[in-house]
Image (cartoon, rainbow, N blue to C red):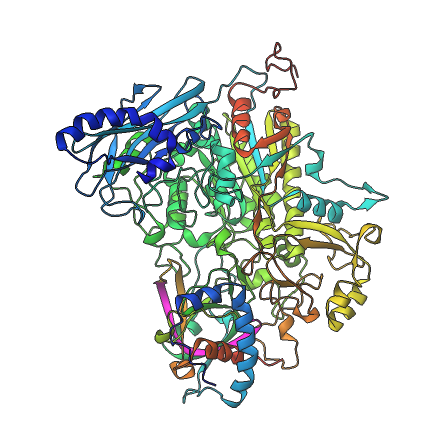
Amino acid sequence: MKLNLPSRPLAALRLALCTPLRLLLATTAALWMGAAQAQSVPVAPTRQPAELRFRDFYRMPVGSGGLEISDTLRRVDGQSVRLVGYMVLQERPALGQFMLTPRPVQTSEHADGEADDLPPATVVVYLDPTQRDWVVPHVRGLVAVSGRLSLGRLEEPGGRVSWVRLQLDSEATRGMTPFEFAGYIHSLQHRH
Amino acid sequence: MSQDLQHPNNTTTTLSRRLAACVLACAAAGASIAAPTVSRLTPPSELFTSGQSAPVIARFLPGQRFDLQATLRPEDATKSISAARFAIDGKAINATVALRDCASGCLAAVPKNASIATVRAVSVAKPGLHTFSVSATQSDGQVVSASGNFEVVELVAGGQKVKNIVILLGDGMGAAQRTAARIVAGGYAQGKSIAPLAMDTFPVTGLVKTASLNSIVTDSAPGMSGYVSGNKNNNNEQGVFPDDTLDAFDNPRIEYLSEYLHRTQGKALGLVTTSDVFDATPAANAVHTSNRGAGTGIVDQYLDDRGLTGLSVLMGGGRKWFLPSTTPGSARGDRSDYAFSADQAHTAEIVRRWGVAPGKLDKDRDLLADFQASGFRYAADKDALDAIDPRKTDRLLGLFAHSNMNVALDKIDGRRGKARGVTGRVVDDYGFPDQPMLDEMTAKALAVLERNRSGFVLMVEGASIDKQAHNMDTERWLLDTIEFDRAVKVVRDFASRRGDTLVIITADHECAGVALIGGSRLSDARLQELVREGGSENLRDKVVGVYEQAGFPKYRMGGDGYPQTTDIDFRLLVGYGANSDRFEDWRTNDRPLQDAQQPFVRSAPLSAYPAGPSTRDMLGSFQITGQVPGDSAVHTATDVPLSAYGPGAYAFTGVLDNTDVFFRLAQAALKGVVLPPGLHSSAAAASPKR
């Protein structure tokens, strides 16, 4: 399934991915590649990642101040984890990353910016560094992602501050084209 | 010269001067006829932009403060601007003209040797149309000038002076959102509304034109600041005119209603919202910035410049901006903050002339502690809010969520113990299970503000009417409109009791092109069957009842004032005219959200779980193609209704520009209530007997 796309999409492709065509492309690619992925399962990391749950991130309820990071979350800082959640549907997605939340959330950046409905337990998921210019097509429903978790304050390139990040396993996506990646993301979705 | 072509009046008014300058300067230099230009002149005017003297764009109250600014471009890269001065009605302004070059920090299209000349915080007392001008000297002696105009609106002696002003702002709330809330909350019988909304009981209603300075379609920042500054702002900008620098906090400022009334009358300011408190609508009452997203600087300015605004009550979500960056969850960062240079007159003059704080890049600031150290009582949840004794409270800060507060539907489900997720209530998933409703916040705000002997300005926002309309989540914006109307009732009762409070309800803009297209022809049980069968032949042709098929949907209200359920038989159906592609099954998006922590159920129809409009409701496979790109519905340019109550209400009838509202509010507070033109004889001249 070689599509001979450049490893970094051209600006025109990126633009196309930002338009309604994005959904069409993503959906088409996802459906198409979803079948392919059934036969071409990404190589799993040799070490079984720890299962992590959003509800275990912070002390809940939050209380009167800031968030309180749980021991569970601290223990997996720097470790390989598996996390199941929803990809945030962003009006203006950042390149090379997406956000994962315990609930389905949509963000309308144009009108609302960071006055958003993101739960405190939101994770920024990074693609492989070679894919940092990609727009990640949105995938509906729950997805399970695996990668190395990092904890602590970081200002993302767009200025948003993240506290929990997950670097996708590079083995899982290395060498993929954007369309192949769309298929891969779809493959992470729980079957239904 | 291209700039001259864009600004013909600039050419006509300055050509003679330029020619005169050129006769001297060009002859001496033997140079070409190129000349320096004025590419931007602020306040904005048609006189400068098109050469037409009308319409007048910028208007101010007598004595209302604003900045003058001009962007001056030398004729080529070897020249520079050596001096500039401003004049109003031909009289030079006796104040420091700050000159800032564009070697760095300006828009890309602006030459590096351009100069931005600014005079901060000027005002004009005399009513009428005024001409202002800038005159700049290039390093070779050439002089360029340009003119614009603005109006100072005359206030006339009126009747009762209102003590308090309340602005109830349903964000994105057009006429359709109001009607929908009335149908659901009050019901209809044989064509008659059974129980009107509180906002229906306001005696005066007008229509508001909502365009911003740079678009027929506004966003919330200029949408709000139009009401409380009297001037058009660009989209994304609040309390400022646009400029050519990248600095989000150095723009030419316009004094807000809160600042003007605090300075002249000592009134306090209260801001209550269901969104993150840094969001555009609340911030566009007190914070001056060209970047509505600059959260750290915005929340800092709330506190640091409260001496100008009289900010005494601030409630909503957005705790993430108040936590030092060392605290988990903090969103504070230097890139969304500001610090004015004391060395550059361009910014130092803001501090000196406006009397504001210089700001500081202080992401580690504990703003929550600083608010409390400044005398603010702090409430973190409803229990704490209830415990606030307003008789002993002058200042109140309520931060009830990390970002936006949860919407009314989810808060009410929380109070009813209704779990919409496998793990429990939505409010639990967010970690804030005890959030107050908007009417509860409003009641407390009024009780605190009422203590101020000089009166107050209070802005109450129903924020997620808009945010959920963006999502095309019908039931969620609907319940937020009902929640907002309950706050309206609290304010109306307060105003009724006091008799000295002017209340307006309006919106900054409409959102999503909401239309009430009819009612379902089916029971909810049958609708669910059709959802499973799917397709437009089922979900459109068999469901949508138009005209008399719609009948009168009947929702039963719970004792808490909200519908017992929104999934009734023969339900109200809503369409969207400004929609993105989406799937629709008409039912409330309340299916148990598959929780990530639960063992995966492979047979579950996960595709039906909401992730966004284009992916939500896919079970029914009734796709509606949208007219707008992306995944969100958008704001529209449609006029919005405004209703008014209390002394001065009659000034708000007719078709108004959003900036008109500012002057009518100010008239009522400063010189007393008057009737608008057309409702009184000229001889009676605006002195109603009430």
- In the image, residue B678 lies in the stretch drawn in magenta: no
Where does the image place residue B491, in percent across and percent down from the top left? 62, 35
Identity of the residue drawn at 44% across and 61% down: A67
Q: Main secondary structure of the magenta part?
A: strand
**Residue B170 position (above or below residue B90):** below
- Residue A124 can be seen in this image: no
Q: Work out whether residue B172 or residue B479 is closer to the camera in this orientation and state it.
A: B172
Residue extent of the magenta highlight: A139-154
Q: Is residue B475 left or right of residue B268?
A: right
Residue lying at the far right of the rendered structure = B190
Q: Is residue B587 left or right of residue A175?
A: right
**Residue A29 position (above or below residue B373):** below
Q: Is residue A174 left or right of residue B15?
A: right
Q: Work out whether residue B7 or residue B509 is closer to the camera in this orientation and state it.
A: B7
Where does the image place residue B175, in percent across and percent down from the top left? 67, 42
Q: Quadrant of residue B615?
A: bottom right
Q: Quadrant of residue B244?
A: top left
Q: Quadrant of the N terminus of chain B?
A: top left
Q: Work out whether residue B72 or residue B557 is closer to the camera in this orientation and state it.
A: B72
Where does the image place residue B90, in percent across and percent down from the top left? 32, 19
Where does the image place residue A55, in percent across and percent down from the top left? 52, 70
Identity of the residue drawn at 64% across and 19% down: B678
Identity of the residue drawn at 64% across and 31% down: B644
